[in-house]
Image (spheres, rainbow, N blue to C red):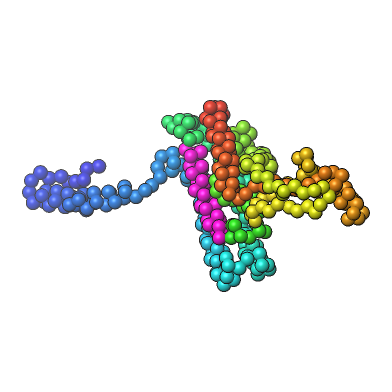
Amino acid sequence: MSTFTNPSTDGRNGTANRTMNGTMNGTKSGPRHGAGNASTTETTRRPRLSGMTWLVWRQHRAAFWTMIAATVLCVAWMVYQRGQMMDFLDAYGFPAKNLDDAEKAFDPYIGAFTTVTTGLTAIPVMLGVLLGAPLLAGDLENGTAKLIAAQSVSRNRWLATKLALTGLVVTVTTVALSTVFAWWWNPIKLYYLDIDWASREFFNTTGPSPVALSLLSVFGGVLIGVILRRTLAAMVVTLGFTVALQAVWGYFKLSLGDIVTATTKPVSPGSAITFPEVPRTAHVLDTSYVSGSGKLFDLTTCTDTLSAEATTQCMKKADIVGTSIDYLPISQMSSMQWLGASILFALTAGIVVFLFIWGRKRLV
């Protein structure tokens, strides 16, 4: 429709109408003298998601924001707990005084460690089940994948955006949690004997281990979802997969280190046997008796005798001349974590490649 309802080409009324309408149009278009351009430039400078990235974020924003919020709360809790622990250690006189002598006074702070590590060790399982399994299985089940495939965006780009954005959120949150937890534990790491650095509560929650375990759990869940194409079934199977992954990882992780063996000096068969000294924080794998020929005997050897004299005779007959201890020093913890994480990262990369080569054909 024309701006002028009663156009006029001459006279004062025509001039007034043109002036009024021109002014109104100019006002509707925005401020003059470059003010509108400045506002537009300011708006465009704001970082905003767009295109496929925006779509994926919006589709999974509830899960992503929940992960971020939970991470912030957990980090804040760990920072608070570390502050409380450091206040106790300063008042106690640590490290001049042995922390093992604190006994029950230090129990509340160990309890805080236990509470947090219980949650941190469960993160890979929860992420695999609640985020990885439904990531593509939900789209395949409700038909969203067919709608995406009908658009101009390729399936490769859609899959890449889904995996990349999910992997980024998982990596950022797990790195933040593992870094802050390691910072909390570090002051007593080499001094408190009741904490075993090789346990899953500490080995799996610091360094690259939680990141690698979480990514493999999530992308393994994604692959299971693509195969099964049903969200609930994928979540159940992924639960079994992540639990099995934790069990296998726990079984093989200690084999990533180089075992150190400490032995005592040989003594005469039947003489008193002593044990070698190992570092305070060492994770002991095995303790054995050693015979004169180098053969190892279990510590239960000669324990079924009824007297000290009979035990001495048994030890002499077995030619036991010393003891040995196999252990892993805490100095190997970081190298073991990175070696194990590199294996897990390689498996994760294999799953991603498999999703692009084979899995994308099923995304319809």
In the depicted structure, whether residue 31 falls above or below residue 343: below
Q: Which residues are magenta?
A: 161-187
Task: Name the residue: 51% across, 38% down.
Answer: 163
Where is the C terminus found, in terms of image quarters? top right
Report if residue 191 is visible in the image: yes
Where is the N terminus found, in terms of image quarters? top left
Q: Is residue 175 magenta?
A: yes
Most common SS among magenta residues = helix
Residue sitting at the far front: 268
Nearer to us in this view, 344 or 22? 344
Q: How many marks?
A: 0
Residue sitting at the far bottom: 91
358 relative position to 19: left or right = right
Image x and y of residue 331, in percent: 58, 49
Residue sitting at the far left: 11
Image x and y of residue 262, in percent: 68, 47
23 relative position to 333: left or right = left
Q: Quadrant of residue 363?
A: top right
In the depicted structure, whether residue 41 falls above or below residue 136: below
In the depicted structure, whether residue 92 falls above or below residue 30: below
Task: Name the residue: 81% across, 52% down.
Answer: 271
Task: Name the residue: 61% across, 68% down.
Answer: 97
Nearer to us in this view, 364 or 240? 240
Task: Name the residue: 14% across, 48% down.
Answer: 18
Image x and y of residue 114, in percent: 65, 58
Q: Is residue 20 magenta?
A: no
Report if residue 242 is visible in the image: no
277 relative position to 36: left or right = right
Image x and y of residue 166, in percent: 51, 43
